[in-house]
Image: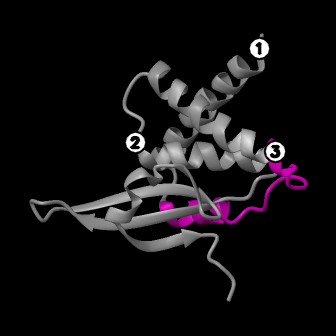
Amino acid sequence: MTSRRRLVIEAAFSLAAARLLLRLVPFRRLVWFFHLKPAGPEPPPAARARLLADVPRAIAAATRLLPGESVCFPVAIAALAMLRRRGVGTTLYCGAGRSTERKLHLHVWLRYGDHGVVGHENADEFQIIARYPEPRL
């Protein structure tokens, strides 16, 4: 089995687990998970760059394989978990914005420093209401 195929399978399991977690566990109880530190040391820059490209691609492939819709929150949680397992610490952002019909919309995205990982494409349309972990001042 190729490493890409293994990564897509892991992404499918991570995405399914994130969906289940969001259905069964209240948000206030999930916050601790967003603050966990990465497992092990951060990979060297080239390996980290490869992971920051490969993990989102694997998650995108997994969303096409799984039944149902994969919205921004479980996608971001799955990417966060997969990268954390590989030593890459990311920041999960939660934002709110209004549509043209003035309806409130929420969005979640993941970043590594200034690099968008998943959900970041339209993040500028949302006002940040929370980030995990919170930056230290």
Q: Are marks 2 and 3 in contact (CB under 8 Å)?
A: no
Give how far apart the Cα atoms at labels 2 and 3 are: 29 Å
Residue 44, compared with residue 93, is above or below; it is above
Toward which corner of the image does residue 32 lie, by quadrant? bottom right
Q: Label 3 is placed on what type of residue? A: Ala
Q: Residues within 10 Å of mark 1 (few under 14, many from 20)?
A: few
Name the side, left or right, on which 87 lies relative to 122: right
Q: Are marks 3 and 1 in contact (CB under 8 Å)?
A: no
Give how far apart the Cα atoms at labels 3 and 1 are: 20 Å
Q: Find residue 135 and report its horizontal and vertical position in percent.
A: 65, 78
Residue 86 visible within the image: no
Q: Find residue 103 and report its horizontal and vertical position in percent.
A: 16, 62
Q: Find residue 77 and report its horizontal and vertical position in percent.
A: 57, 49
Label 3 or label 1, whichever comes before in sequence order = 1
Q: Which residue is mark 2?
A: 71
Q: Which residues are magenta?
A: 27-47
Q: Label 2 is placed on what type of residue? A: Val
